[in-house]
């Protein structure tokens, strides 16, 4: 059912800089294990006002239930659960780890960057999450983020990238729409 | 052609899979709809899909399904997606 409207809503939702405030960025943290690492990402979501601490428990429970598939790329985990009363608004957090932490993933361990994601529905975080995934798909940008010394630097990198996207592709929406019509 | 991107919740990892799959399909010049699904709905939705994209771990949890299952290990690596999609449907 949501699939039918996905193509239209796909570019909807706030930009990454709107869902990732400086309060949600924690750099050079230390975590004893994957649970602690996920909790750091949850704490950052709480600090930014996106969630209550109960959501952090839900993120940990999700990994316990479904396994470490949340390690979506070498060194990068995407911690999240489903929309719940513990999610106050959509939000994204970033935590970099001083010492990489094993999540039990066969190929992508150990993790250096944990992304926390809080969603209020299935679509409202897509623009922000897509931007983040594209940002991280470039090794230079990824290493720049992981090596950043201050949260403000990360905010600047993300903002510069986002502004670059907007400048490069003024007709991105139109292009996407026409693609959707032909398929 | 209909492709189903499957993850645990259907709203995080699978969205990234879909985004990367759409980029790869465009590059390969293949017309396909990519939909997302959580694990709970995946078996039912698989009946009408031509291909499933997911992680190796979730593919094991999913068990046997009718369409071909392509497992991705790096969800943000366009090259891996292009190579695997090309091998599966190109």
Image (cartoon, coloured by chain):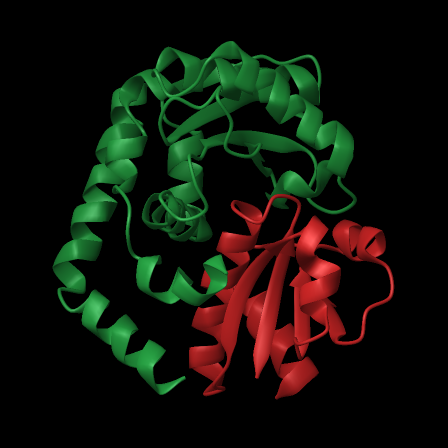
Chain colours: A green, B red
Above/below status of A45 relative to A182: above
Task: Please identify the quarter of the rendering in which residue A36 is found.
Answer: top right
Above/below status of B11 relative to A170: above
Q: Is residue A96 visible?
A: yes
* Viewer-nearest residue: A143 or A170: A170
Q: Position of residue A170 (x, y in %)?
A: 13, 64
Q: Position of residue A26 (x, y in %)?
A: 42, 17
Q: Which residue is drawn at 41% across and 61% down?
A: A6
Position of A102 with respect to A72 (left or right) is right
Task: Please identify the quarter of the rendering in which residue B2 is found.
Answer: bottom right
* Viewer-nearest residue: A136 or A123: A123
Q: Residue at x 54, y 19 (%)?
A: A55
Q: Residue furthest toward the front?
A: A1
Q: Position of residue A88 (x, y in %)?
A: 38, 21
Q: Residue at x 26, y 41 (%)?
A: A14
Position of A130 with respect to A43 (left or right) is left
Q: Which residue is drawn at 45% across and 61% down?
A: B19
Above/below status of B48 relative to A21: below
Q: In which quarter of the image is the C terminus of chain A?
A: bottom left
Task: Please identify the quarter of the rendering in which residue B69 is found.
Answer: bottom right
Q: Position of residue A45 (x, y in %)?
A: 43, 19
């Amino acid at each position: 059912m949501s699939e039918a409207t996905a193509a239209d809503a796909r570019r909807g939702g706030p930009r990454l800089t709107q869902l990732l405030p400086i309060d949600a960025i924690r750099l050079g943290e230390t975590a004893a294990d994957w649970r602690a690492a996920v909790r750091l990402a949850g704490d950052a979501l709480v600090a930014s006002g996106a969630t209550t601490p109960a959501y952090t428990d839900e993120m940990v429970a999700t990994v316990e239930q479904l396994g470490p598939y949340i390690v979506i790329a070498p060194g990068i985990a995407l911690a999240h659960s489903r929309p719940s009363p513990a999610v106050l608004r959509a939000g994204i957090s970033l935590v970099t780890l001083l010492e990489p932490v094993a999540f039990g993933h066969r190929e992508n361990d150990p993790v250096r960057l944990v992304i926390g994601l809080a969603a209020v529905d299935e679509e409202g975080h897509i623009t922000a999450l897509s931007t983040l995934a594209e940002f991280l798909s470039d090794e230079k940008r990824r290493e720049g983020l992981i090596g950043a010394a201050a949260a403000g630097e990360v905010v600047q990198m993300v903002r510069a990238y986002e502004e670059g996207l907007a400048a490069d592709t003024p007709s991105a929406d139109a292009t996407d729409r026409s693609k959707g019509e032909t398929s | 052609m209909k492709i189903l991107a499957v993850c645990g919740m259907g709203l995080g990892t699978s969205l990234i899979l879909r985004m990367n799959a759409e980029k790869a399909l465009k590059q390969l010049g293949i017309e396909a709809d990519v939909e997302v699904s959580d694990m709970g709905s995946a078996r039912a939705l698989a009946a009408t899909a031509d291909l499933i994209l997911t992680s190796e771990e979730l593919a094991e949890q999913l068990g046997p399904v009718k369409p071909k299952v392509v497992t991705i290990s790096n969800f943000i690596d366009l090259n891996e997606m292009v190579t695997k999609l090309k091998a599966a449907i190109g």
